[in-house]
Amino acid sequence: MPVRAQKATPPLSPLRDVQFKSLPGSSFRRSTPPVLAEVVDRVRCEFVEMRGFSPTVEQAARLFQINREECGRILKDLVDEGFLRQTSDGRYRLPSQQ
């Protein structure tokens, strides 16, 4: 019986190589200083990588090692652009999660 060669599938790129696109009407990413943009990208990646992740502002600030106020602003901006949603108990999560 002849052996069939399977097509090689390209390896998946690490999430850190994914370039996120701003939603229409969102100017947050364009006006953000480079260091803050890196923090915002890291926050986005954590939510994408950890499905079911729903931290409070305080928990997220500790995880991302940024102050609570800065973390709150970042999370609020991500809610405003539709990337995250805030639950009634003050947690943040991806919109597709209940």
Image (spheres, grey):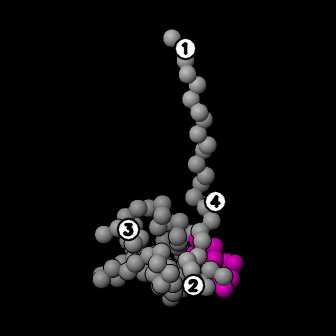
Q: Comparing marks 4 and 1, which lies closer to the viewer?
A: 1
**Local crowd at mark 3 within 10 Å, few (<14), some, or many (≥20)?**
few
Marks 4,1: beta carbons within 8 A? no
Residue 86: quarter of image: bottom left
| Residue 24, x across and y down, in percent | 57, 80
Marks 3,1: beta carbons within 8 A? no
Q: Comparing marks 3 and 1, which lies closer to the viewer?
A: 1
User: If you read the primary sequence from the N terminus, does the residue marked by circle 4 or circle 1 appear first?
Assistant: 1
Question: What is the three-letter code of the residue carrying label 3?
Answer: Ser
| Residue tagged 4 | 17
User: If you read the primary sequence from the N terminus, does the residue marked by circle 3 or circle 2 appear first?
Assistant: 2
Q: CA distance from mark 1 to mark 2?
A: 57 Å
Decide which of 83, 36 is in the foreground and name it: 83
Q: Circle 2 sits in a helix, a strand or a loop, which is it?
A: loop
- Farthest residue to the top: give it: 1
Q: CA distance from mark 3 to mark 2?
A: 21 Å
Q: Circle 3 sits in a helix, a strand or a loop, which is it?
A: loop
Residue 19: quarter of image: bottom right
Marks 2,4: beta carbons within 8 A? no
Q: CA distance from mark 3 to mark 1?
A: 46 Å
- As drawn, the label of residue 96 is 3
- The answer to whether one can see residue 70 in this image is yes
- As drawn, the label of residue 88 is none
**Local crowd at mark 1 within 10 Å, few (<14), some, or many (≥20)?**
few
| Residue tagged 1 | 2
Q: Circle 4 sits in a helix, a strand or a loop, which is it?
A: helix
